[in-house]
Amino acid sequence: MTGEAVVISVCGNEATVKISKSSACGHDCASCKACSNPSYEISVINKIGANVGDKVLIETKTSKVLFASFLLYILPVFMLIIGAVVLEENPMGLWSVFVFISMALVWLLIIKLTNKKLKIKNEIVAFNQKD
């Protein structure tokens, strides 16, 4: 995944860049309300030696973003289906609370353990020549 940004500060081999939201904008601000924060700042690896004010292209490994999305959105759905199947056999009140609390704790544990390994880091890959 790539995006355009402007370097706002540099510290060693890292830089802080400002990214403007634009790709999904329908320019219907009254109904969307996403324009209340039209840009955001992130820290990136500065491999190309960009300086403050440079327009750059940043990149994130798509596989890591997709894996994180799976953990946050798809895995809970699978766990909900598994919980429903388990509770279909034994739909007792306390048992259902135990199953869903246990599954939520397992999901949070999986997120916590993989978060340390995942380390999604953005990198500056090129100067943006478009103007």
Image (tube, rainbow, N blue to C red):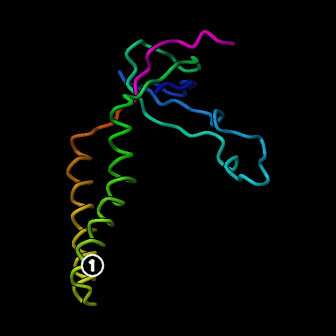
The residue that appears at 34% across and 44% down in the rendered structure is 68
Q: Nearer the viewer, residue 101 or 12?
A: 101
Highlighted magenta segment, given as a residue range: 122-131
| 109 horizontally vs 57: left or right | left
Q: What is the crowding at mark 1: few (fewer than 14 residues within 10 Å), some, or many (at least 20)? A: few
In the displayed image of the protein, which residue is found farthest to the front?
A: 89
The residue that appears at 71% across and 53% down in the rendered structure is 33
* Quadrant housing the C terminus: top right
Tell me the amino acid under the disc marked 1. Answer: Glu
The residue that appears at 26% across and 61% down in the rendered structure is 107
Q: Nearer the viewer, residue 129 or 8?
A: 129
Tell me if residue 116 comes above or below residue 63 in the rendering: below
State the image coordinates of residue 108 (x, y, percent, origin top left): 27, 61
State the image coordinates of residue 61 (x, y, percent, origin top left): 36, 28
> Picture quarter containing residue 128?
top right
> Picture quarter containing residue 80?
bottom left
State the image coordinates of residue 43 (x, y, percent, origin top left): 43, 33
| 19 horizontally vs 66: left or right | right
Per the image, label 1 sits on a secondary structure element best described as helix
Residue 129 is inside the magenta segment: yes
Tell me if residue 102 comes above or below residue 130 in the rendering: below
State the image coordinates of residue 62 (x, y, percent, origin top left): 39, 30
Residue 1 is inside the magenta segment: no
Residue receiving disc 1: 88
Q: Nearer the viewer, residue 63 or 15?
A: 63
Label count reads 1
In the displayed image of the protein, which residue is found farthest to the top?
A: 129
Q: Nearer the viewer, residue 78 or 97?
A: 78
